[in-house]
């Protein structure tokens, strides 16, 4: 682990879609820039003004929910603040540019920052992004290039699988093609979704929600069998007991290479696009 002085000289920034538990954010000294959830025209900063639990209530109420990314000025303020605290370089790691313009906003802000900023498009989301952020935070010293490479490598080697109760939220947000969404809805299928090439994709189709979750377990067990040491994360939206039970099952099933399992509610912005009932698993090399 880098020393306290090295951590100060190399600041690590991410966005709230990393869904990192607060304890990990604090331990790694990471700065999180919130995205926004817009409810009936009113904007809320996720994790600040709007919790995932409140989002579940809003989604179930039938309110109109959209999301928006931070502007370059939000990143500029964060970069200036960490530079004023002594950072000589910044690594800024964000969700896939295929899913959001957040990384573009970070790149624009980086052009006028007072210190070098290495912006990383993780090409993923959730704790796959979070694990990449932690890799950057663990990397050596004030070498921003090395930290950026560490983040990108860990993100590229991660697996993200999830199941949702309905494809309607993804269809509305344009995150899943209308043909795939209609196919799943018309046939009553519950697909296993994943992140491929920076985008959401249908991995498999299951007849029931239970079978979709079973396939996630089977696919993750097969995935981690190829890894020597790995970390897992289980995401949920408003179902902590279900996620905890899922994490216990994975702990008992995934073998000796498992280093840690984190149970984390998905960020409100991601939750707004997938809807209540999300269950996701992330695997990444330790």
Image: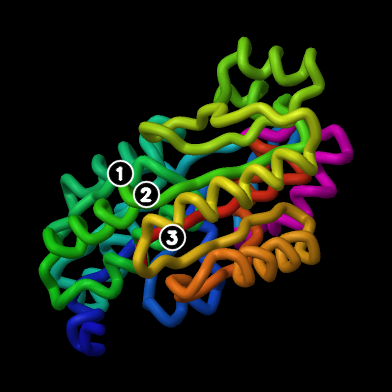
Q: Quadrant of residue 206?
A: top right
Give me the residue at 11% from left, 68% from top.
143
Query: Is disc 1 in contact with disc 2, using a CB cutoff of under 8 Å?
Result: yes
Q: Please tell me which of labels 3 and 2 falls first in the chain.
A: 2
Seen from the viewer's position, the closer of residues 234 and 272 is 234
Asked which secondary structure carries label 3, the reply is helix
Mark 2 lies on a secondary structure that is strand
Q: Please tell me the numbered disc located at residue 121.
A: 1
Q: How is the image coloured?
A: rainbow
Q: Nearer the viewer, residue 261 or 5?
A: 261
Report the span colored magenta.
Answer: 47-66
* Residue to which mark 3 is pinned: 130
The span from disc 3 to disc 1 (Cα, nearest Å) is: 12 Å
Q: Farthest residue in the right direction?
A: 61
Label 1 vs label 2: CA separation?
6 Å
Identify the residue position indicated by label 2 in the image: 94
Q: Nearer the viewer, residue 229 or 9?
A: 229
Q: Quadrant of the N terminus?
A: bottom left
Q: Is residue 95 left or right of residue 176?
A: left
Circle 3 crowding by C-alpha within 10 Å: few under 14, some 14–19, many from 20:
many
Q: Residues within 10 Å of mark 1 (few under 14, many from 20)?
A: many
Q: CA distance from mark 3 to mark 2?
A: 9 Å
User: Horizontal and vertical percent for residue 44?
Assistant: 64, 49
């Amino acid at each position: 682990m880098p020393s306290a002085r090295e951590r100060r000289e190399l600041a690590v920034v991410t966005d709230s879609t990393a869904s990192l538990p607060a304890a990990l954010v604090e331990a790694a000294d990471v700065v999180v820039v919130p995205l926004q959830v817009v409810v009936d025209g009113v904007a809320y900063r996720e994790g600040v003004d709007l919790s995932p639990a409140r989002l579940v209530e809003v989604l179930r109420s039938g309110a109109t929910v959209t999301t928006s990314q931070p502007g370059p000025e939000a990143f500029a303020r964060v970069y200036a603040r960490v530079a004023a605290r002594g950072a000589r370089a910044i690594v800024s790691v964000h969700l896939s540019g295929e899913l959001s313009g957040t990384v573009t906003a970070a790149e624009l802000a980086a052009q006028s920052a007072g210190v070098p900023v290495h912006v990383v498009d993780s090409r993923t989301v959730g704790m796959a992004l979070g694990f990449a952020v932690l890799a950057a935070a663990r990397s050596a010293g004030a070498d921003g290039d090395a930290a950026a490479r560490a983040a990108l490598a860990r993100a590229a080697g991660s697996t993200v699988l999830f199941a949702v109760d309905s494809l309607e939220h993804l269809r509305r947000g344009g995150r899943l093609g209308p043909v795939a969404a209609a196919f799943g809805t018309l046939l009553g299928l519950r697909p296993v979704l994943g992140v491929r090439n920076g985008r959401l994709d249908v991995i498999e189709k299951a007849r029931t929600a239970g079978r979709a979750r079973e396939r996630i377990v089977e696919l993750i067990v097969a995935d981690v069998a190829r890894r020597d040491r790995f970390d897992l994360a289980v995401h949920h939206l408003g179902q902590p007991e279900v996620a905890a039970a899922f994490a216990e099952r994975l702990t008992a099933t995934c073998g000796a290479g498992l280093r840690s399992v984190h149970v984390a509610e998905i960020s409100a912005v991601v939750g707004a696009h997938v809807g209540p009932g999300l269950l996701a698993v992330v695997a990444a090399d330790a």
